[in-house]
DNA sequence: GATGATTCATGCAGGATCGCATCAACGGAG
DNA sequence: CTCCGTTGATGCGATCCTGCATGAATCATC
């Protein structure tokens, strides 16, 4: 398969409809010298390799000579009118093949992730986002973009922001909405918090409570640093008391288990799975809600699928609160 | 660390005294585009990366733009006057780093193997070469070339030749001396073969025998295809009989064990380790010797250490027969 | 043994990239 | 708010590489 010109003119634009290339060709584009040597090594024949690469034979002949001169090692043995690999060349070729494979795959992956039709969105969300919310969102999005793939990460706020900065995530849903100079955030919804009490608790049969009524209860909360912990402290303070912390956990769902086991009460979003031994009580005062927002790194050009998904999310404000009927807006 | 010019002028010759480069630089030489991107990715700063690579800033700026255009994906995000990696860029950078590492190591390895002082020789020899011969040779060679390293492979003739053709071996000692158009061979020595019999055998107390005296004995030999098997058949034919094969093995040393166990007699070179239950009898007629030679692929330019070792071997003709006192010249 | 077909290497023109200098834009300091 | 240092992008001449054509050398065939 030969392509015209010197190979450099396959400069594909990022617009839609741009053609795909086999991994082989990506490697040739990204690391021409090594791809040339790999081709020669595979054929042990310069003319055939040249035909294979779609370049003139003279180019390869010169390039191989330069490569050997640069490396200072004879890679090819010229017998009469043929060439073969020296042991050194053979050893080098093995590593070059591995390396080119890696590059080819990487290029294809990056390219595929940016494919407007079948690209990838790396998307993070909170454990407490509800078992239905995110799958429903994605299902709905894929009705319009059926082949877009998702890499889903379920974690807590700080970690997700860190992973965005590391380039592992394209965007994430968090609460509270973080503030940082390198982040763009949008408020999407708010989610009610419930006072969770064990089944036999004195408040267990109530539908609604004021938070102050739980002032004397032992609380189970997340460890300091989690958004929900901070919010619990703030709301209790607003209700006029400092909560007695009986236990600190790392997973919101385990907290619900601790409550069911009678170790205390907790302030939590609606449950991901209904848990028999615990009751969720609406909190009338103070207003117990947390904001849910979407965040991404500022100034980063998006691939098409990511841009599409962002637009989609912003168009769905007010549908992110899971089973805890969202407040208005 | 900056070097002058455009980087292309570090064309090192293969002569002695040529300077070494760190792995980093090899990668830059072999795969400039990727090395450039890797540097930019590491710093997330074009000017610093340019300083680091020793190229002007404009080159990198242009190269990155070309790379992104070729790939069709935005790898860098320009915020105001700085740049940072996009998630796609970050993912790509990881693979690029791995790939460059591989290439850098490969280049260093190939280069090191060709280093006249501390290079490597991949050297194959027969199982039956004796436990002392090869180590002694190498010890002696290293008196003059103390830092040269060896990759030793112990195998049989056909396999070693195949591995030379695959580029895994630089040269090998074999017997019989093979003939092939792509091989260069030199006769180095000849090794006497002994008739090995069990301890209680009727010939066990003899010092020398004619091979014909063992015409009625059951023989244990190597499988067809081994040089030593062919030689056994030929010698027996010359002695006027066709040997009755009681057992065929794959390892010369196991044959000796079979003889000691009383399963038959064998025609073998001197033992690698003395084995109590077997006796080695000199064979007076026919003349039972096998030739030992060195072989390498024709037309392959050698690295310095390999060339040195070849010259050394050729200068030691007549000292390869191990414990079986070699016949003259 | 001479001829013909291959194969790798080399002279020469064109083009792409490189390197130098400069420009435009952003951000911190006063 | 203005100035100045810094950063990434761009115009222009030099250089290297590419690509076409041809040369030199080898192997097969008649």
Image (cartoon, coloured by chain):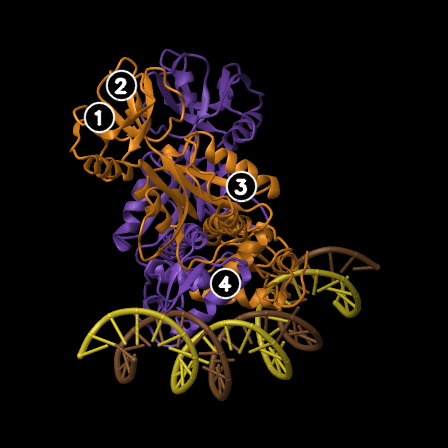
Chain colours: A orange, B purple, C yellow, D brown
Quickly name the residue at label 1. A213
Mark whose residue sits in front, 3 or 1: 1
Q: Secondary structure at mark 4?
A: helix
Q: Distance of mark 1 from mark 2, alpha carbons?
A: 9 Å
Asked if the residue at tag 2 contacts the one at tag 1, i.e. Cβ–Cβ closer than 8 Å, the answer is: yes
**Are tags 3 and 4 found on a single chain?**
no
Query: Looking at the image, which residue is at 58% across and 21% down?
Result: B242
Q: Is residue B14 above or below residue A107?
A: below
Identify the disc placed on residue A168.
Answer: none
Quickly name the residue at label 3. A149
- Pick the residue in front: B164 or A305: A305
Q: Secondary structure at mark 2?
A: loop
Say whether residue A6 is visible.
Answer: yes
Of callouts 3 and 2, which one flags the residue occurring earlier in the amino acid sequence?
A: 3
Asked if the residue at tag 4 contacts the one at tag 3, i.e. Cβ–Cβ closer than 8 Å, the answer is: no
Q: Distance of mark 3 from mark 1, alpha carbons?
A: 47 Å
- Pick the residue in front: B141 or B274: B141
**Are tags 2 and 4 found on a single chain?**
no
When asked about the image quadrant of residue B113, the answer is bottom left
Quickly name the residue at label 4. B67
**Are tags 3 and 2 found on a single chain?**
yes
Q: Is residue B10 left or right of residue A246?
A: right
Please rate how many residues cluster around mark 4, counting C-alpha atoms within 10 Å: few if below 14, some from 14 to 19, many from 20. Answer: many
Q: Can you give x and y, in whole percent of width and height, for residue B265 in the image? A: 45, 18
Of callouts 1 and 2, which one flags the residue occurring earlier in the amino acid sequence?
A: 2
Q: Distance of mark 3 from mark 2, alpha carbons?
A: 45 Å
Quickly name the residue at label 2. A203
Q: Can you give x and y, in whole percent of width and height, for residue B186 in the image? A: 48, 49
Q: Secondary structure at mark 3?
A: strand
């Amino acid at each position: 398969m030969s392509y015209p010109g010197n190979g450099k003119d396959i400069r594909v634009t990022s617009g839609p409809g741009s053609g795909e290339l086999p991994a082989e060709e990506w490697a040739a584009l990204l690391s021409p010298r090594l791809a040339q040597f790999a081709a020669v090594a595979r054929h042990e024949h310069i003319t055939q390799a040249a035909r294979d690469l779609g370049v003139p034979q003279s180019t390869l002949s010169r390039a191989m000579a330069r490569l050997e001169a640069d490396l200072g090692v004879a890679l090819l043995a010229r017998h009469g009118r043929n060439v073969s690999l020296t042991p050194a060349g053979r050893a080098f070729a093995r590593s070059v093949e591995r390396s080119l494979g890696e590059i080819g795959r990487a290029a294809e992956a990056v390219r595929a992730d940016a494919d407007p039709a079948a690209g990838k969105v790396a998307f993070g969300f909170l454990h407490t986002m509800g078992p239905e919310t995110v799958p429903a969102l994605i299902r709905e999005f894929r009705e319009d973009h059926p082949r877009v793939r998702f890499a889903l990460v379920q974690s807590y706020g700080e970690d997700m922001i860190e992973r965005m900065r590391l380039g592992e995530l394209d965007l994430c849903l968090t609460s509270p909405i973080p503030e940082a100079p390198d982040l763009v955030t949008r408020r999407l919804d708010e989610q009610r918090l419930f006072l969770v009490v064990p089944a036999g608790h004195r408040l267990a049969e109530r539908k609604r409570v004021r938070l102050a009524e739980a002032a004397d209860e032992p609380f189970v909360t997340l460890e300091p640093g989690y958004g929900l912990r901070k919010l619990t402290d703030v709301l209790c303070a607003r209700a006029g008391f400092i909560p007695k912390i009986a236990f600190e956990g790392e997973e919101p769902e385990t907290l619900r288990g601790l409550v069911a086991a009678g170790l205390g009460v907790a302030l939590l979003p609606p449950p991901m799975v209904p848990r028999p031994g615990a009751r969720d009580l609406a909190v009338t005062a103070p207003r117990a809600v947390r904001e849910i927002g979407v965040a991404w790194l500022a100034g980063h050009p998006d691939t098409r699928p990511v841009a599409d998904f962002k637009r989609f999310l912003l168009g769905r404000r007010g549908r992110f609160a899971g089973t805890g009927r969202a407040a208005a807006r």
